[in-house]
Amino acid sequence: MSLNDKLNSLIEGKIDFEGQKTTDRWLRYSLVIATAVSFLLGFVLQSQKVTFSVLGVSTLGAALVLLPPWPIYNKHSVKWLPAKKNE
């Protein structure tokens, strides 16, 4: 497999429906937790800079971990029906 093929497979990003559901669920959980933690830290320290910094870093971290098409997200591939032949 050439470097170009590997790069194309990473960019294409094939994940199945279960992988999409898993990614969506974990992304929601991580963003809710990041929002609560950043709000509490900002409130305790009385700093909006801390609030938005923690939220921004948490969002970027979650995006870097959850958005790439990891192979774990493609374990339940869809079995398509064969095409009908037109006569």
Image: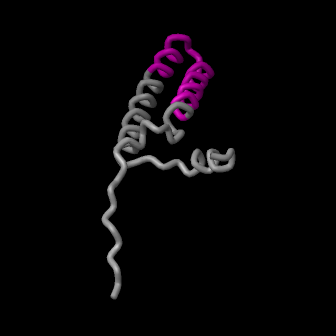
Which residue of the protein is positioned furthest toward the front in this rendering? 1
Q: Position of residue 55 (x, y in %)?
A: 54, 26
Q: Is residue 64 left or right of residue 21?
A: right
Residue under the image location 43 percent in, 28 percent down: 30
Residue under the image location 51 percent in, 42 percent down: 69
Along the line of sight, the residue nearer the viewer: 87 or 76: 87
Which image quarter is the C terminus in? Answer: bottom left
Q: Is residue 68 above or below residue 42?
A: below
Which residue of the protein is positioned furthest toward the top in this rendering? 45
Q: Is residue 78 above or below residue 20?
A: below
Along the line of sight, the residue nearer the viewer: 83 or 37: 83
Q: Position of residue 22 (x, y in %)?
A: 37, 38
Q: Position of residue 34 (x, y in %)?
A: 47, 25
Q: Residue 45: say if magenta.
A: yes
The overriding secondary structure of the stretch rendered in magenta is helix
Q: Is residue 36 above or below residue 85?
A: above
Along the line of sight, the residue nearer the viewer: 73 or 6: 6
Coloring basis for residues: one colour
Q: Position of residue 68 (x, y in %)?
A: 54, 39
Picture quarter containing residue 59? Answer: top right
Residue under the image location 68 percent in, 44 percent down: 3
Q: Is residue 67 left or right of residue 84?
A: right
Magenta segment range? 37-63
Picture quarter containing residue 63? Answer: top right
Q: Is residue 85 left or right of residue 58?
A: left
Q: Is residue 78 above or below residue 57?
A: below
Residue under the image location 51 percent in, 39 percent down: 67
